[in-house]
Amino acid sequence: MLGVVGSLSLDLVDGGPPRPGGAVFYAAEALRLLGIPARIVAKSAPADRVDLGVDVEWLPAEATTAFAFSYEGDHRTMSVLEVGDPWRAEEVAGLGGVEWVHAGGLLRSDFPFETIEALAHGRHLSLDGQALVRPGRTGPLRLDGNVDPRILAAAQILTLSEEEADVLGDVPVPEVVVTLGSRGSILYAGEEELRIEIEPVREADPTGAGDAFAIGYLAARHAGEPPPAAASSASQLVSELLSRR
């Protein structure tokens, strides 16, 4: 079974009112479209919980991570308004039956190594680059590469934006996908480097596209697709999701 673990966020897009977001929110959107059962464990302040349209195990938090951001084409400018609670190892201990799991972090403070170690034990672990390069502090978001190398060593799959890839450089992860927004993605798997094209969707809000891609890729790999086919499947999923907005 697939698993997704992550915190809900509150997103203020282009000066609009707060709306739910984060990897767990967009993972649920992708899984609804795929029609695939999964174990989803989410965390937020109780007042901020929303119906994700799938079964979710909610854990309480003192605070919900909040962002403000705006877009200019594929370029996104962000600020961190609130830092949510970190995940503890004991909170992810009950994932029996989950063989492939995505840790959808929002900030580096979300998943300390001890929690990543518990998630990775006996499983294929997928990570999102934003949880590696985004410091867990409020203010304008400035990425840095101060990553615990033990976290990278625990992962089998890493999904990065182009900006995150520039910060991290080469990483010792077997499968790395760099998403390029409307320009598709690049897959690095073993000695293979493959460019994956995507059908652009005009005038669609791209928020969460990277999160949906990560889930689509993980689901395809869980189903037995090789990395190139999984990246193509994930790109098609993102195009379909964006076309529905």
Image: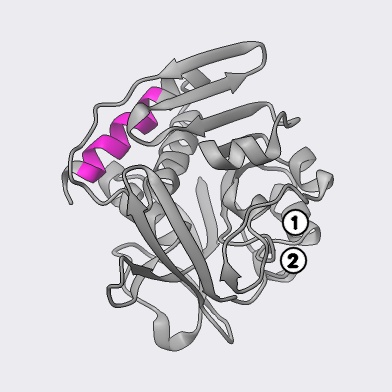
| Callout 1 amino acid | Ala
Q: CA distance from mark 1 to mark 2?
A: 6 Å
| Residue extent of the magenta highlight | 232-242
Disc 1 vs disc 2: Cβ atoms closer than 8 Å? yes
Residue 41 in picture, x, y percent from top left: 52, 65
Query: Tag 1: Cα neighbours inside 10 Å, few (<14), some, or many (≥20)?
Result: some
Residue 237 part of the magenta-drawn span: yes
| SS type, badge 1 | helix
Asked if the magenta segment contains residue 155, the reply would be: no
Q: Can you identify the residue that label 1 sits on?
A: 118
Residue at the spot x=49%, y=37% of the render? 218
Most foreground residue, 115 or 140:
140
In the depicted structure, whether residue 125 falls above or below residue 63? above
Residue 12, quarter of picture: bottom left
User: Disc number at residue 89?
Assistant: 2
Q: Main secondary structure of the magenta part?
A: helix
What's the coloring here? Answer: one colour
Tag 2, which secondary structure? Answer: helix
Instruction: Using the image, determine if residue 84 lies above or below residue 24.
Output: below
Residue in the foreground of this view, choosing between 73 and 6: 73
| Residue displayed at 31% across by 26% down | 198
In the picture, the disc for residue 160 is: none
Q: Residue at x 83, y 46 (%)?
A: 150
